[in-house]
Amino acid sequence: ENMRIHKLISLSELGAYWDSDILMTTAEEDGDIAEMASMAKLMLRESFFDDGNTEQRQSDGENHKGGHNYVLDPISGRMKAIIYRTSASAIQDGQPKFFLNLLFQSIKVHLEENQFWDMLRIHQRFSTYQTSLKYRRYRPLVPVSRNPAAWWRFAIFSVLSEIHERNQEWTWEHISQARKKRHSYIE
């Protein structure tokens, strides 16, 4: 039994920009990743214009529209979607579940060198933060100069926990649990 649902979705002036001239903070300075996350939200977000100058912006070939450095120029368009509500066997036979027809005049993507390096720096900072989360429970609350022994314990427990985690993956108990989870997922 094939049931089709038709949808028409309109998109008006969606763009993404990355302003590289915004002052960046480091996790070492304030120790709070929440501020970095809010900064990233400010730097890369959707931009909807309502100034009525769409034609002027589209004819302008520069990447600096509205005072922002666009990674994705504002685009407008339509998407026609057909969603097939079929049985799982029909999907396995090669019938698609979704059929999308995207209609855009043009899509322009720009990436300047400073935007690229800023993105790499933010990625590196979030990666560093993810790593520090892993060992945060061992981290002492006192400075190194006050209690060096606590910091040595922190270093030792961090390394040992990594080794323990790696060795745990190869125990028969862990393999058996993973196998049971896989079989229950398949069923």
Image (cartoon, rainbow, N blue to C red):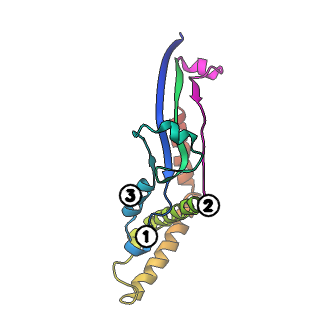
The kind of residue on which mark 1 rests is Ala
Q: What element carries label 2?
A: helix
Label 3: few (<14), some (14–19) or many (≥20) C-alpha neighbours in 10 Å? few
Of the two numbered discs 1 and 2 on the same chain, state the one appearing first in sequence. 1
Counting from the top left corner in percent of width and height, residue 38 is at 38, 57
Q: Residue 113 carries which label?
A: 2
Q: Residue farthest to the left?
A: 141
Which residue carries the number 3 mark? 38
How many other residues sit within 10 Å of disc 2, few (<14), some (14-19) or many (≥20)?
few
The local crowd at label 1, few if under 14, some if 14 to 19, many if 20 or more residues have their Cα within 10 Å, is some
Residue 5, can we see it? yes
Give the Cα separation between the discs numbered 1 and 2.
Answer: 23 Å
Q: Where does label 1 land, which residue?
A: 27
State which quadrant residue 138 falls in: bottom left
Q: In this view, does 124 lie above or below 43?
A: below
Q: Nearer the viewer, mark 3 or mark 2?
A: 2
Distance between the alpha carbons at the discs numbered 1 and 3: 13 Å
Secondary element at tag 1:
helix
- Residue pictured at 49% horizontal, 17% vertical: 6
Query: Which stretch did the figure color magenta?
Result: 85-112
Q: Does the magenta stretch include residue 81?
A: no
